[in-house]
Image (tube, rainbow, N blue to C red):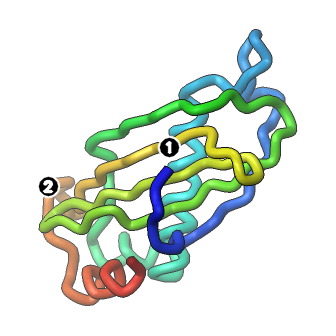
Amino acid sequence: MTDAPEPIVRMPLRVRFHECDPQGVVFNAHYLAYADMASFEYLKALFGSHAKLTERGIDLVVAESNVRYLAACHFDDELIVAAFTQRIGNTSLTLRFEIRRGTEPVTEVTNRYAWVDTRTLRPTPPPDDVRESLTRGR
């Protein structure tokens, strides 16, 4: 992993039985769900809630995801999902997620989101105060 600044949020998570495949390891798609859960905690930490953004007519939608698997996770593992601001674009936001079991890195996820108008779902720049909050939170 990287020598990054402190994450915006660290979300604890315990692997549930139904998230494991017949091999006894976490099914790969669940790591994206873990990142999605942490993204809502990220928004809560910076803005109070996801709803505070949608009430203003803006939202984030996933445009691209990249997952790098480093080690398998199993039922009842205790994980920490850390969320970092990687890039603030004109109409996009890239978040990086590090998933760890203790100090062991197990997965890295990068999601690029597009800011959209909630009525049209067309790309739109976030308001200046939202951009400032993202920049301060880096």
Q: In the image, what residue occupies the spot 72% across and 53% down?
A: 103
- Left or right: 56 as drawn, with respect to 42: left
Question: What residue did someone put label 2 on?
Answer: 122
Q: Secondary structure at mark 1?
A: strand
The residue depicted at 59 percent of the width and 45 percent of the height is 34
User: For this rendering, which residue is in front, 104 or 36?
Assistant: 104
For mark 1, what is the residue?
108
Residue 135: image location, x then y, percent = 31, 81
How many residues crowd mark 1 within 10 Å: few (<14), some (14–19), many (20+)?
A: many
The amino acid type, in three-letter code, at marker 1 is Glu
Question: Splitting the image into 4 quarters, where does residue 63 fall?
Answer: top left
Question: Which callout, 1 or 2, points at the residue further toward the start of the chain?
Answer: 1
- Specify the label residue 34 is tagged with: none
x and y, in percent, of residue 8 in the image: 51, 73
For the point 81% across and 48% down, the residue is 78
Relative image position of residue 35 (x, y in whole percent): 53, 49
Dot in front, 1 or 2: 1
**Is 127 positioned to the left or the right of 98 in the image?**
left
Q: Residue at x 58, y 60 (%)?
A: 82
- In terms of depth relative to the viewer, which is nearer, 123 or 71? 71
At label 2, the amino acid type is: Arg
At mark 2, the secondary structure is loop
Measured Cα–Cα span from mark 1 to mark 2 = 29 Å
Q: Is residue 118 left or right of residue 35?
A: left
Q: Quadrant of the C terminus?
A: bottom left
In the image, is 46 to the left or to the right of 131? Answer: right
